[in-house]
Amino acid sequence: MRTAIAVLETSTLTEAGWRRGRNLLATAAVVGWLLALAGFGADPQRFAFSYLVAFLFVTSLGLGALFFVMVQHLSGAVWSVSLRRIAENVMGALPAAFVLFIPVGFNLHRLYEWTHHEAVAADSVLQGKQAYLNVPFFLVRGVAILLLWALLSRLLRTWSWAQDQNPRLAPPTRLSAAGLVLTVLTVTVAAFDWIMSLEPHWYSTVFGVYFYSGSAVGFLAAVILILLGLRRAGYLVREVHVEHYHDLGKWLFGLIVFWAYIAFSQYMLIWYANLPEETAWFRTRTQGAWLPVALLLAFGHFLAPFFALISRASKRNLRQLGLVAAWVLAIHYLDLYWQVMPALDRSGPRWHWLDGATLLAAASTVGLLFWRQLRGRALLPVGDPRLVRSLEFHNV
Amino acid sequence: MSQSTERIGGIYGVAAEFEDAEELLAAVRALRERGYRKLDVLSPFPVHGLAEALGIRRSPLGWAALVAGVTGASAAFLLQWWTGAVSYPLVVGGKPFFAVEPSVPVAFELAVLLASFAAVLGMLALNGLPRFHHPVFAHPRYPAVTDDRFVLVVENDGERFDAVQASEALRATGGEHIQVLEAE
Amino acid sequence: MATVSQPAESPLVLEGVTLTQVTSTVAGVVERRTPRAWWFAFAFTGSLTLVLLAMLTYLVTTGIGVWGNNSPVGWAFDITNFVFWIGIGHAGTLISAILYLFRQRWRTSINRFAEAMTLFAVACAAIFPAFHVGRPWRAYWLFPIPNEWSGMWPNFRSPLIWDVFAVSTYGTVSFLFWYLGLIPDLATMRDRAQTHARRVIYGLLSLGWRGSARHWNHYEMAYLLLAGLSTPLVLSVHSIVSFDFAVSLLPGWHATIFPPYFVAGAIFSGFAMVVTLMVIARWFFGLHHLVTMKHLENMNKVMLATGLIVGYAYAVEFFIAWYSGNPFERFAFVNRALGPYSWAYWTMVACNVLAPQLFWFRRFRTSVPVMFVVSLLVNVGMWFERFVIIVTSLHRDFLPAAWGMFRPTWVDLLTLAGSFGLFLTLFLLFVRFLPMISMSEVKAMMASREGA
């Protein structure tokens, strides 16, 4: 345990540093929300859509973190122990989604066609879906899902914090197994509800997996950036070393390939069958000015990071890994933008300052919750008996 | 030892048996410190850390596989475009003669196929296999190498090689069954 | 990318086993006199293989009509068996490649066994589409090689041609992977050989492997590359098999979730088959100290996970069939659950979704009888899954006037039984003549444990 205690002293943020970070985030939050509010006054429709993308983006990162932490517990992974706390802190910010959902809930009419009575009355297909696509049930589902995610993230974090005091605590394997099952189901419902039902005629059975795989990609990119940021500030320099980054790079690489596999399968099957009610979704998103965005996704969400990460050296070069992670995180946002925005802007992307303002508001809110957990607390799970082995971990 | 150097073919090297991996690694390090550069180890499984100790560089097979994979994918696209759109254009199911979407699966498979062959055949080529005769097979303890023993070979690296000195060096590091191996 | 770090309570190789004991245990199985029980088993599976040959001969000489396939059910047992066997083949590559990349060291004792299973399953699978083409002597037309109709090429826009490429690539790469892993062990067999014939045969097969450190360096890289290549390959193969169905317009076949759902199902069925065979081989050849309860338990966990994924896919398909608002989609699924083949549907659900739930409990995960029964149930359930997907979607399509039923003929049933004969015969030959556990890998794992 000697190593662990030595680590503890050097890997907690200084109070001054923590305050600086908090002030920065708080300022960003105030500016972001004021701008968003102003935008809501100016163009509520645009606000609703921009905000939905921002909400999905920050929520997806938390979901990716929840997935990552549960998988680490289930596989009993050693390599990731020294960076698990940072992942847990991203996961720990997931309850923010509960609050961030409120503006979505109040803007349903601006977002979802199926909330319009006159549209439903004129459309027999939408009438058939009313048992599922109706406002009260939609809100109940949303609240229940967000509650479940918040509960899971709290339980896992509580366990981890308790482990700091009591290294003998058994890993939460059962909680992670049950949690993973429930999360997969609820993420599917969330993807169907929040994104798929924007185009209420369209359906794709794999859409939940598509959203989840994108979330995991986004999280991996985000956690690499957070760790590199802490490293630049002088934290977790020896504790999260090149071997850990190498493995994070492998995870990012693998998840990018998995995302591409799901995205391609979904697209190709719909392209091939060419059913009108299915191709409409892709048709909108590959026509006009949306086509460059779709091509950029194929290139930027798959080809570019694939070749950028394929060699061993590139995953071990922190500068290159950081650049790829930043690129991938931005492309993950674009992926969600490309899924959501064509429901509003059929002809092509109409970039709007509200996109940035809502993203700033949502991200800084999540950031504040993330940051709160760093105060005075070790940046790595100091109580974990596997920590020493994780520090000594070496790729073959 | 001079009489064996005069034989046709000369000496391949001197080999000794070691019982466990730790001892072996120490011996390799000691011999390299004494200036022996051309060392080889025969072992029943890849010994962790041995490649570094012997100064063996990382295998370049990955690049061979990458080149083969890109070749395979390009060839597949070319094949599908030429057969479908140039040589034998036939409308099936209202699909275009050539499109990227339905060409991806075959391109992927050929990329994997060629890359796999590159990896395996490249491994054999770089290792000079198959090769059914080798001087080390003459070592009396050789058969145990594929069971649980290790044989360290100090290979003949030219005119200045002295088999007696090499044998002594091996003995000093704890090797047993020291034997001079004749070249083929 | 994770290392199993369970405490020493359930080791991967039991304590006190030495390196040379690993050699003698594994190689001993091959070197011993052929046990009488092996001959009995061989006689039985060999006869079944002869049944397969007889059925195929009958099919070729008489015509495809000896099978029960007929309008509207043009694909039935043949394609069901094809997908079933290909699925079985997925566990081998999964264990060899994916678990290798994830540094799951428990794979070491079982990967060779599972890889061999992959090859034999792929061989069984390939029979069905090859004979279903009707004129198997023209099957080479499937490949883009110039033929007597100069200028005629395969239709690359058809998923059936993708299948040809996927399955043949998979068979080839799996063979390379398996053979690559065998090379060092074949050298061990060569060096232990007591007869000249054995020495020559194993010597030729081992390509003169001598275990040089420089060779190991390239060897390990080649192995890593094949693992890296096989991982997406294994995903692609069953995805492409699923494309055979999913690119169509048929309700029940056209679903975007098919690729990952088929892959999970394939892994699920493959692991079930590994457990079935491993439980028998472990008991028969006394491999308890190399294939420990830990291996079996981990395989059961994988079965639980993939079984849940398959259950998820059933549920999502059903929900989207309703959600789509498409009456044909809705009917296809209602017909599955309540139509004339509902018995097959509920067999599938019971075997694939309900049975593996037992594995939530350690007591059942670590009970050999329970896992044996569950693995058999999963084998049955996964066969029925393919039957349900193929037959129920075809037998009642858009026009009620064109509805019909499929009933297998005795040729269908005996061909399926015969394919099991071929699979098991190849398996028996494998365990008789080749080391069924990778000795060099087990030794490397033991050595690294001592070092740690």
Image: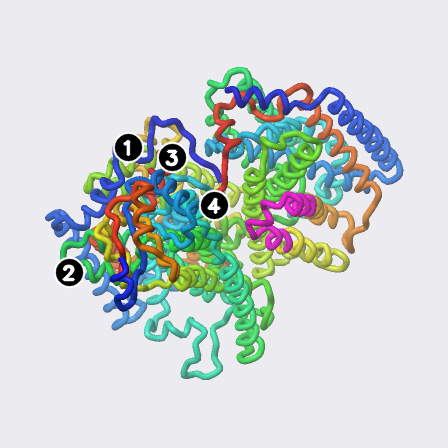
A83 vs C58, left or right, is: right
User: Mark 2 belongs to which subunit?
Assistant: C
Label drawn at residue C451: 3
Q: Is residue C381 above or below residue B160?
A: above
Q: Which residue is mark 2?
A: C196
How far from the left and from the top, in percent, is residue B38? 40, 55
Q: How far apart are labels 3 and 2 at the CA level?
A: 38 Å
- As helix, strand or loop, the secondary structure at mark 2 comes to helix
Amino acid found under the numbered disc labelled 3: Gly
Residue range of the region highlighted in magenta in the rendering: A304-327
Q: How far apart are labels 4 and 2 at the CA level?
A: 65 Å
Q: How far apart are labels 4 and 1 at the CA level?
A: 52 Å
Task: Please name which of the two marks, 4 or 1, marks the residue nearer to the observer.
Answer: 1
- Kindly indicate the quadrant of the structure image that contains residue C298: top left
C94 vs B78, left or right, is: left
Sequence-wise first label, 3 or 4: 4
Amino acid found under the numbered disc labelled 1: Leu
Task: Please name which of the two marks, 3 or 1, marks the residue nearer to the observer.
Answer: 3
How many numbered discs? Answer: 4
- As helix, strand or loop, the secondary structure at mark 4 comes to helix
**For the residues tagged 3 and 1, is the chain the same?**
yes
A19 vs C182, left or right, is: right
Q: Which residue is mark 4?
A: C334
